[in-house]
Every structure is written in structure tokens, then in C-alpha cells.
Image (tube, rainbow, N blue to C red):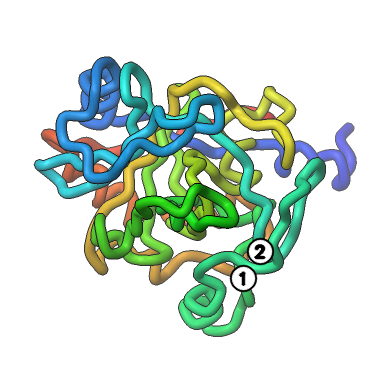
């Protein structure tokens, strides 16, 4: 017989993700090979090469995404900034770029994003002289019309996971996410603050306008699963704008 503690542990190990709807899968498959048709930034770094990743814009929906300059999309590096750090991180900063907005949108429920709980994506590159080369920057809010804490659809590991636009990179590197999002995407890769997912097979799709902001998210959630699930109502509506539309279906698996 299972004890209450063992049942709780089992439930905690269940990761909720979604099957990729047909319209989004079609977008993923049709854009992954070749160059971006509509780049809206210079080429930044994936961390493996100096200039191999553009911010690209989908002309139909207005969504922006990271695209390899040849084949593929983006990788996953770990951002441990905010309310909590993570193992292996050597560059932790005590707050994310949108700390004030998080506190306001959550009505004070949380003071900042937590990399272990909040599934957030890093978009934009300040490209400062200290962290980058002091060259051209990309501001996702100004250059892509993506509002802070907007829902981002992430296609990774043959599933759909929802996150929010939660931080900005000070340098030139792209593809950073919270540890919670990274582990939801790739639960069996032992990811931590110093180990990411190196393949360029992850699509981060951020949508413009105020309707994409995660106004009703459970910012005070106690788990990744609870927070990510609270983004689905907005996320599903946004994803329908890609191609012909389609509704996501939840699938479950264990970490």
C-alpha cells in the first residue's frame, strides 16, 4: 500500500506538457530548415558560435522567435536570476529585468520570478560593453512589440510548454530559460545552472500585444506544473493564430 508521502512524491514527479497542435507542428517543421525569411535583428550568439541566431518575425501572426542562421531554432541555456539561484550557476543576479512588473501583476504575491517554479524565457539582448561587445542591441518590447510577462509558446522535446517573457540578456547570448522550464522540456538530461541543452531544436514563440500578457497566471504557485498550467488559457488562444489554428491536448509523463 502506498503511504500518503509516497503518493505525494509520485504526484510531484508528474510533468504536465501538451502535444503540439497540428498548426504549430506545421509551422515548426516548415521553418526549421534554412534561413529566417524575415530577420529583425543582427545575428547573436547561441553560446556555441558567435553569430548564429537571429530574432525572426512571422509575418502572419506578428510573433517573434529565435532562428538559427542556417538550420534549426535555438538551444536552452539556464537563467538562474531572480528570487532563487540554482546549482552550478556562477553568474547569478538577484533580480530579473521585470521584477517590479512581477510584483505588480501578482498583487504582491511574489516579489520576483523563481527559476525553479516560474517557466520563463529570456528575450532581448542589451549587448552591453561589459557583457557583450557594446554593439547593436535587440529590445523585444520595442523591436518586437512583446510586452513583459507575455506568454511564450515553447516547442521542445516534441511537446508544447508555456512560459512567460521574464528576463533580458545583458550580453549577446540567446536561448536562456528558467530551470523549471528547461527541466519540463528535457527532464532526463540532468540540466542545472551550468548545463543546458545544446541542440538547436527548441522554438520560442512570443506574441505581440497586451492580450498576450499573463494577467491571470498563478504567480504564487508552489510548483512548475501549477504555474505552467495557469498560462494555458492565454497560450492556447495565441497559438491558434499560427496558421490554421488548433487546440493543444495535455499529455502526462514522469520526470
Does residue 232 show up?
no
Residue at 15% across, 46% down:
61
Residue at 42% across, 64% down:
149
255 or 31: nearer the viewer: 31
Quadrant of image for the N terminus: top right
Q: Which residue is mark 2?
A: 82
Quadrant of image for the C terminus: top right
**Percent position of residue 242, x then y:** 18, 39
The image quadrant that residue 221 belongs to is bottom right
Q: Is residue 22 above or below residue 153?
A: above
CA gap between label 1 and label 2 equals 6 Å
Residue at 27% across, 64% down:
142
At mark 2, the secondary structure is: loop
Q: Is residue 102 above or below residue 9?
A: below
Could you tell me if the residues under marks 1 and 2 are in contact, i.e. CB atoms within 8 Å? Answer: yes
Q: Which residue is mark 1?
A: 112
Amino acid at each position: 500500500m502506498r503511504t500518503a508521502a509516497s503518493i505525494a512524491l509520485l504526484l510531484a514527479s508528474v510533468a504536465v506538457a501538451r502535444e503540439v497542435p497540428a498548426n504549430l507542428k506545421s509551422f515548426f517543421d516548415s521553418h526549421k530548415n534554412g534561413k529566417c525569411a524575415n530577420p529583425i535583428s543582427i545575428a547573436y550568439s547561441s553560446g556555441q558560435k558567435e553569430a548564429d541566431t537571429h530574432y525572426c518575425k512571422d509575418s502572419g501572426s506578428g510573433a517573434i522567435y529565435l532562428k538559427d542562421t542556417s538550420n534549426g531554432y535555438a538551444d536552452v541555456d539556464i537563467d538562474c536570476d531572480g528570487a532563487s539561484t540554482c546549482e552550478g550557476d556562477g553568474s547569478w543576479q538577484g533580480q530579473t529585468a521585470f521584477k517590479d512588473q512581477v510584483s505588480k501583476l501578482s498583487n504582491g504575491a511574489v516579489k520576483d520570478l523563481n527559476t525553479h517554479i516560474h517557466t520563463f524565457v529570456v528575450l532581448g539582448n542589451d549587448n552591453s560593453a561589459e557583457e557583450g561587445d557594446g554593439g547593436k542591441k535587440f529590445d523585444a518590447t520595442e523591436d518586437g512589440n512583446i510586452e513583459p510577462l507575455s506568454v511564450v509558446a515553447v516547442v521542445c522535446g516534441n511537446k508544447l510548454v508555456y512560459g512567460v517573457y521574464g528576463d533580458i540578456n545583458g550580453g549577446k547570448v540567446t536561448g536562456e530559460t528558467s530551470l523549471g522550464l528547461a527541466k519540463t522540456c528535457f527532464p532526463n538530461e540532468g540540466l542545472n545552472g551550468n548545463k543546458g541543452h545544446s541542440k538547436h531544436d527548441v522554438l520560442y514563440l512570443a506574441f505581440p500585444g497586451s492580450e498576450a500578457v499573463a494577467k491571470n497566471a498563478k504567480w504564487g504557485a508552489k510548483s512548475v506544473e501549477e504555474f505552467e498550467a495557469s498560462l494555458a488559457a492565454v497560450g492556447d488562444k495565441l497559438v491558434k493564430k499560427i496558421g490554421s489554428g488548433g487546440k493543444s491536448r495535455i499529455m502526462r509523463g514522469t520526470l
